[in-house]
Amino acid sequence: MTARIREFLKRRVDEGPCLVVDLDVVRDNYNSFAKALPDSKVFYAIKANPAPEILKLLVELGACFDVASVGETEAVLAAGATPDRISYGNPIKKESEIAAAYRLGVTLFAFDCEAEAEKIARAAPGSRVICRIHCDNAGADWPLSRKFGCEPAYAADILEFAHRQGLVPHGISFHVGSQQNNVAAWDRALASTAAIFRTCAERGINLSMVNLGGGFPAKYIRKTPKLESYGKAIFRSLRKHFGNAIPNTIIEPGRGLVGNAGMIEAEVVLIARRTREDEVRWVYLDIGKFHGLAETIDESIRYPIKTPKDRDEMAPCIVAGPTCDSVDVLYEKTPYPLPVSLAIGDKVLIEAAGAYTATYSSVGFNGFPPLRQYVI
Ligand SMILES: *Cc1c(COP(=O)(O)O)cnc(C)c1O
């Protein structure tokens, strides 16, 4: 926890769970990316946390942005970014959305099939396009595989198709899966990418950019490699597959930029035993899957949960949210150790909750308001 967040929570008087994000940490993270991957431009994947204060800070720091919708495009422009700093990275768009983004000045779009190239050619003529390829997401705690990306062997064909539609084939993108624990995960995708670059060159199409996507981890409970190791491994793979002709690269961190910058303060609503001798207590918090902790689906993301009594004896608990939906259980398969002395009304801190929480919060399922967010 940062001293600034601690001070803020001490003075806080309102009720209910809230997320507090420290902009100083976002700034440090941005600088760490610039240092670990000095040749790659940062395009912040704003879906991780689109708070206007975060976008404004990143505009000031010189970042670019990966957006997935017209709404996200407008948010980035409202924060002061010019449209040349925007990549529309969602390969699934309505033609009307492409047209709206193009009217706002966006001229860089992702696609992964011929039908999408036709839409972009009609709605955003002459734009640069990046072909998203499918890649292995092994090693990721939150995989994104299968929904996006053509098979690498098909990419040159659809880039050539896009070229014939009057678009400018610009490069290749992929995503190795979010919270990627393996620093070498980029290697195979980069081998495929280099092969696509060669095939396209033979057909007279010169690609110039590789979008390395996100996947850079936040620190939850499990230890993760240092950002520096990711930078080194990626550079080694670029050298190996592209030799001396390393293309321009961009990265699209979401979680890695904001994950560890935020912390949720929540409260224990109830502690129950289901039988008199039950070893495992059910601990119900005032926040659950529907109000910010959606990434606990399948217990994929295991947040550090801190209490004021962590020096006391610990015992395993099932941790659940407050709603009347049985899906709203956070940790059960692997019970969570919490202090035996934990009591109803105690505050708990859910750390590293800056990414994919407030934006995932429902509008008000079961009458619980969306997760409140403070950016300090
Ligand atoms: C979500 C997303 C990202 C961000 O991924 P992280 O693992 O959070 O860094 C980057 N690029 C694209 C295209 C995405 O959809």
Image (cartoon, rainbow, N blue to C red):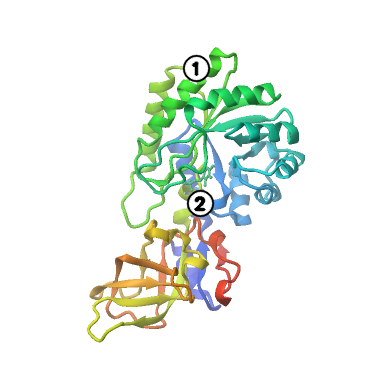
Residue marked by disc 2: 26
Q: Which mark is residue 267?
A: none
Residue 102 x, y percent position in the rendering: 73, 38
Quarter of the figure with the N terminus: bottom left
The residues bearing labels 2 and 1 have C-alpha atoms spaced at a distance of 38 Å
First in sequence, mark 2 or 1: give its number.
2
What's the residue at 43%, 31% (across, down)?
Answer: 189
Q: Is mark 1 within 8 Å of ligand 1?
A: no
What's the residue at 52%, 36% (across, down)?
Answer: 149
Name the image quarter holding residue 206.
top right
Residue marked by disc 1: 198
Discs 2/1, front: 1
Quarter of the figure with the C terminus: bottom right
What's the residue at 48%, 31% (across, down)?
Answer: 151
- Foreground pick, 158 / 215: 158
Whether label 2 touches label 1, CB < 8 Å:
no
Residue 270 x, y percent position in the rendering: 40, 82
Residue 184 is left or right of residue 357, and the answer is left
Query: Is residue 331 positioned above or below 244 on the image?
Result: below
